[in-house]
Image (cartoon, rainbow, N blue to C red):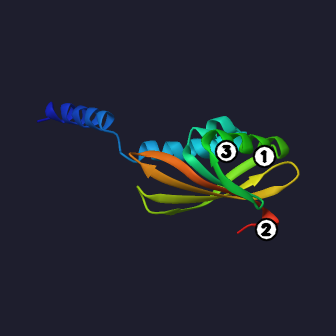
Amino acid sequence: MNKLLPAFFYLVMVVFSVFPEKEAPVILQIENISNFFSAGSSKDLARFFDNGVELNINGDQGEFSKIQAELVLRDFFKKHPPKDFQIIHKGGVENQIQYFIGNYTSPNSQFRILIKIKSSLDVLRIFSLEILSSDSAF
């Protein structure tokens, strides 16, 4: 019996490494989105954009293609380089629409960020992004 115990633990480890927890990739994607905001990387964030993205940056809003949304976000990061970004609230329904509220700080101003995401086959797609100065935040 003692010889079977190590083999059992080895088998359990192999099974969990081959079939990882389903939610892990989604959590990693959320961390990546947060890190890309912290770095001010519109190019990396655009990888998570849906084909059409609703953008609202301090009241200037519209529906943009993935490429247009990246350019608009790049301009925002140029005007307001990142100093810090923290997700402060998460909500929504798992495997459907989720949202994240974060605080974005640049050297001269602070913003509240609302990111709306839909999940399809464990891939997150940002379909709406609101960036509002803290004075006019939701």
- Circle 2/circle 1 CB separation < 8 Å: no
Residue type at mark 3 is Ala
Q: Percent position (x, y) of residue 24?
A: 43, 44
**Residue corresponding to mark 3:** 69
The Cα–Cα distance between marks 1 and 3, rounded to whole angstroms, is: 11 Å
7 shown above or below 59? above
Q: Percent position (x, y) of residue 129?
A: 64, 54
- Circle 2/circle 3 CB separation < 8 Å: no
**Residue corresponding to mark 1:** 76
Q: Is residue 113 visible?
A: yes
Residue that appears at 24% across and 36% down: 9
> The N terminus is located in which quarter?
top left
* Comes first in the chain, label 2 or label 3: 3
- Circle 1/circle 3 CB separation < 8 Å: no
The Cα–Cα distance between marks 2 and 1, rounded to whole angstroms, is: 17 Å
Residue that appears at 55% across and 59% down: 99
Q: For this view, does 31 lie left or right of residue 59? A: left
Please tell me in which quadrant of the rendered image residue 51 appears: top right
Please tell me in which quadrant of the rendered image residue 101 appears: bottom right
